[in-house]
Image (tube, helix red, strand yellow):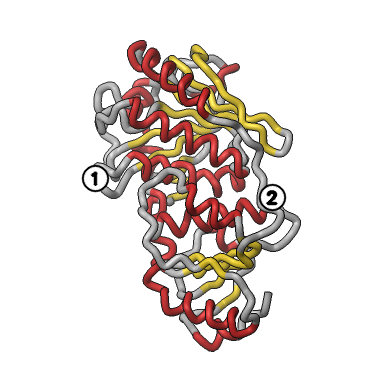
Amino acid sequence: MQLLDELEVIHKGKTKTVGLYHGDLTDLTPDEFFDLLVISAFPNNYVTIPSSMVEALDRKGLSVEKLAKDKEIDLRKIYSCWLSKKINPADYQGLQFSRILCFEPLVKNQPPPELIGDIFQSLLPMTEQFGIKSIAMLIVNTGSAKYSISKILPILLEASINWLNIGLDLDQIKIVAYTQEQAAEAKKIFSQKKNTIKNASSHFTAGYNYDCFISYSRVNTNEATWLHQKLVKENPQVKIFLDKKEIKPGFAWQQEIFNALDDCQYIYTLLSPEYLKSKVCLEEYHIAHFRQRESDQQILIPIYLYSAPLPTFMKLTNYIDCREGSQQKIEGIPSL
């Protein structure tokens, strides 16, 4: 593949790269190896549509349909995607990756920012659990979805840079334009975006305007209010960020959320079935998770509010059990 342009993100002294390439992701050499290929498909439908990545892989002898029958992880209910088992590149001429991440949007015509947001949020558990350090993808949603590169690429770049800046454990993101026409347009957009972005290493506020942030689903407003009242009762001077406004979903990166989460010493997350279905709530959880990973102190305080099938990455963090929405248990949560 031909490298057209590249930008760097410095995180904790380590250089990470976001590169724009032109070429064929199914015709690579061993020195072009990356860990994960991101593709898309219709839900439970792996028909080899001409010019699709599914069809290109099938021509190389790699069947996405067969991979789908024996998935490593199925996150379609949360992030509309699944991860394949390991692939041996030596078995397929021109393929130089070890896993596939396949997106199958459950909602028809899913807004591009929401799709891109799903991609990056799903990478959190995968980078940590499977040691994925490098990924590659075509410019998503510009094929059968027929969105323009000028619509997609700026969102994709901004999301890539912001997630790397807060600590997403990837070293390299390759964004690939397949045709010459796409490459010419993408190179111009990449250059313009690159010139407007000031790279800043991830950092967090030394002094906080809020003592804590309560992250919750709107369905659980009563329980969030109980927690708020408990904290205020114990310390009338406590400063709490409790956002009762609906934050518009469907963005790959919500700066408003990040700014508020960055400005709180502690972050309570009220886990419930509705919480796990909310893209905004999950984004809040992930940012809190990254903040805690970057700190030597406890920041993330999960409260298991109602029984739900918690993803593995949530089970690995100690939580306070307040099931099933017990007001008494919430009021008994240890003080800050």
Residue depth check, mark 2 versus mark 1: number of the one nearer the observer: 2
User: Residue drawn at (54%, 39%), measured in percent from left and top?
Assistant: 162
Vertical arrangement, residue 195 with respect to residue 123, above or below: above
Front residue (pair 126, 96): 126
Judge left or right: residue 277 versus residue 316.
left
Please tell me in which quadrant of the rendered image residue 105 appears.
top left
Q: Whole-percent x and y of residue 67?
A: 41, 38
Where 270 falls versus 117 (above or below)? below
Counting from the top left corner in percent of width and height, residue 243 is at: 46, 65
**Residue at the spot 37% in from the left edge and 61% down from the top edge:** 246
Helix, strand or loop under label 1:
loop
**Relative to 289, residue 210 above or below:** below
Q: Is residue 15 left or right of residue 113?
A: right
Element on which disc 2 rests: helix
Q: Residues within 10 Å of mark 2 (few under 14, many from 20)?
A: some
Q: Earlier in the sequence, mark 2 or mark 1?
A: 1
Amino acid, disc 2:
Glu
Mark 1: amino acid? Lys
Q: Which mark is residue 108?
A: 1
Q: Nearer the viewer, residue 27 or 194?
A: 194
Residue 195's mark? none
CA–CA distance between discs 2 and 1? Answer: 37 Å
Q: Is 117 on the left or on the right of 160, as rendered?
A: left
Q: Position of residue 90 (x, y in %)?
A: 54, 22
Q: Is residue 222 visible?
A: yes
Residue at 47% in and 31% down: 157
Q: Are dots 2 and 1 in contact, CB under 8 Å? A: no
Is 21 or 281 nearer to us in this picture?
Answer: 281
Q: Residue furthest bottom?
A: 328
Q: Position of residue 161 (x, y in %)?
A: 54, 35
Q: Quadrant of residue 236?
A: bottom right
Residue bearing mark 2: 294
